[in-house]
Amino acid sequence: MRKQIVAGNWKMNLDAAQSQALIDNLQSKTFNDDVHVAIATPYVHLAAAVSQTAHSAIDVAAQNMHQAVSGAYTGEVSASMLKSIGVTTVILGHSERRAYFHETDALLAEKVNAALENDMQIIFCFGEELEDRKAGNHFDLVTSQLTNALFHLDVTSWNNIVLAYEPVWAIGTGETASPEQAQEMHAHIRTVLAGQYDDALAQRISILYGGSVKPSNANEIFAQQDVDGGLIGGASLNADDFTAIVNAF
Ligand code: PEP
């Protein structure tokens, strides 16, 4: 059975006290034991979040990292720095990084390599813009994002990869892909993985859906055969909503 995962992407939200309070609140909740839960806090809260969650099953992830080992990259953070404070998971390729920070597939391939060199787990995000979907290019676009950023990897490296399909038109918009649209794309992704690698790999990779997942729609989305969980933005900032989503499986 594939790993079921619900990860919260806090983006650039919450100060230190608010972060601590949200984690306290989450730790008072009862989560479905079968679901792996992660929260991606802003960089400045990571170390505190790691120590706060030390005795709980909540994993703490970074929202980004730089591809270089170290050096003159003012404002950036490397994989080994994250590892040194106990962060072993990183989100790469989020659509906001692609859109506002001009992250290309080629750059993301470098970031993926750097994360793997440090044996980090990667939640790799990708997805089409509205124009791509309207033009009927969404399957090809997603195939090319995966090909360009990930298909240089060998089979073993995929042990560290979780995919997160996030149609850009559904992120933070209140617009959700229908469960059928999510399932159709997730099935496509498995077909592409099977073609590039083999069926065993395609069947073992967890593929999350992201884009306006809420307590009211999580159950229907997670019920789809090829959907293994969610990457949650806005709703992850509310402990009750996030818990309801984790327990929607
Ligand atoms: C996200 O940021 O990855 C996301 C899915 O955001 P939201 O849930 O707010 O659409």
Image (cartoon, grey):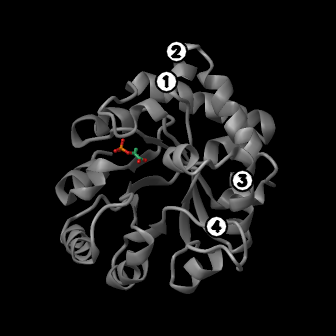
For the residue pair 76 and 175, the one nearer the viewer reads as: 76
Residue 59 spot, x, y in % from top left: 43, 70
Please give the residue where the numbered disc 3 appears in the rendered image.
Answer: 107
Disc 1 packing (10 Å; few <14; some 14–19; many ≥20): some
Residue 160, can we see it?
yes
Q: Amino acid at mark 2?
A: Lys
Residue 245 spot, x, y in % from top left: 28, 48
Tell me whether circle 2 and circle 3 mark residues in contact (CB < 8 Å): no
Please give the residue where the numbered disc 1 appears in the rendered image.
Answer: 130
Disc 2 packing (10 Å; few <14; some 14–19; many ≥20): few
Q: Amino acid at mark 4?
A: His
State which tag comes first along the sequence, 1 or 3: 3
Q: Amino acid at mark 3?
A: Leu
Please give the residue where the numbered disc 4 appears in the rendered image.
Answer: 66
Q: Amino acid at mark 1?
A: Leu
Identify the image quadrant of residue 218: top left
State which tag comes first along the sequence, 4 or 2: 4
Please give the residue where the numbered disc 2 appears in the rendered image.
Answer: 134
Query: Distance between the Cα atoms at labels 1 and 3?
Result: 23 Å
State which tag comes first along the sequence, 4 or 3: 4
Disc 4 packing (10 Å; few <14; some 14–19; many ≥20): many
State which tag comes first along the sequence, 2 or 3: 3
Tell me whether circle 2 and circle 1 mark residues in contact (CB < 8 Å): yes
Quadrant where the C terminus lies? top left
Residue 216 drawn above or below residue 204: above
